[in-house]
Image (cartoon, rainbow, N blue to C red):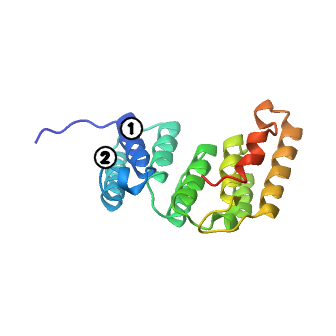
């Protein structure tokens, strides 16, 4: 066997491909879920070995790799644990955790307020994608009923953030209101 050098970009690309495959419906996946998740874990173990052997990665590379890894996880709980263990995290890290909860049909609506508290504790500002993913979790689905109270709370948070920051990307639109009505 010939050994190939693996760098951060390669690991991230492979993890993203696994995450993309996991986001597909069961019949459209290239292999079984357990094999994909096992491969992602194996790659993260390899990364840890590379770091122990002296390989250095800058903070952004590490955050990007971990964000990609989070998207491969089957459990929202495991995704949150991984996020908590990250030395550095960004809004994409939190959005990845939200995606895992949404993809796996977890009852994420109960965790939304705690997520926003954690964002605040870390000094990370949510973006429109954060709100859209959370609002989609409020939509009716097979696993949960419509949560208009939570949707309204999120929309009020978004309005407040837009008012405070004047960030045009956080402007309320029809798309925002529709996100709470249509499950993704």
Q: Where is residue 53 in the image (x, y as percent from the top left)?
A: 31, 46
Label 2 neighbour load within 10 Å: few <14, some 14-19, many 20+: few
Label 1 neighbour load within 10 Å: few <14, some 14-19, many 20+: few
Image quadrant where one finds the N terminus: top left
Classify residue 48 as left or right of residue 58.
left
Q: Where is residue 101 in the image (x, y as percent from the top left)?
A: 56, 60
Instruction: Choose top left, top right, bottom left or bottom right for residue 166.
Output: top right
Mark in front: 2 vs 1: 1
Closest to the observer, 32 or 177: 177
Q: Position of residue 13 (x, y in %)?
A: 39, 38
- Mark 2 secondary-structure assignment: loop
- Above or below — where is 10 with respect to 120? above
Closest to the observer, 104 or 178: 178
Residue linked to disc 1: 13
Residue 44 can be seen, yes or no:
no
Q: Position of residue 103 (x, y in %)?
A: 52, 57
- Which residue appears farthest toward the top when viewing the image? 168
- Above or below — where is 143 with respect to 117? below
Residue at the spot x=45%, y=58% of the render? Answer: 73
- Pointers 2 and 1 in contact (CB under 8 A)? no
Residue at the spot x=67%, y=65% of the render? Answer: 111
Q: Earlier in the sequence, mark 2 or mark 1?
A: 1
Classify residue 45 as left or right of residue 162.
left
- Which residue appears farthest toward the left when viewing the image? 1
Residue at the spot x=57%, y=66% of the render? Answer: 106
Residue linked to disc 2: 53
Q: Distance between the residues labelled 2 and 1?
A: 22 Å
Classify residue 22 as left or right of residue 88.
left
Q: How many marks?
A: 2
Classify residue 85 as left or right of residue 18.
right
Residue 132 can be seen, yes or no:
yes
């Amino acid at each position: 066997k010939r050994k190939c050098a693996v760098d951060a970009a390669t690991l991230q690309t492979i993890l993203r491909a696994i995450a993309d495959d996991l986001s597909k419906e069961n019949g459209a996946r290239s292999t079984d879920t357990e094999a994909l998740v096992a491969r992602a874990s194996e790659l993260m173990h390899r990364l840890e070995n590379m770091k122990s052997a002296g390989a250095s990665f800058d903070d952004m590379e590490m955050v990007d790799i971990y964000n990609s890894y989070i998207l491969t996880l089957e459990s929202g709980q495991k995704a949150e644990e991984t996020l908590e263990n990250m030395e550095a995290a960004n809004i994409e890290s939190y959005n990845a955790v939200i995606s895992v909860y949404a993809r796996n049909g977890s009852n994420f609506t109960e965790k939304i307020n705690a997520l926003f508290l954690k964002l605040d504790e870390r000094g990370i500002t949510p973006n429109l994608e954060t709100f859209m993913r959370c609002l989609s979790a409020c939509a009716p689905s097979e696993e949960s009923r419509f949560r208009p109270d939570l949707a309204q709370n999120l929309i009020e948070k978004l309005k407040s953030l837009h008012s405070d920051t004047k960030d045009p990307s956080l402007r309320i639109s029809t798309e925002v209101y529709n996100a709470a009505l249509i499950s993704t």
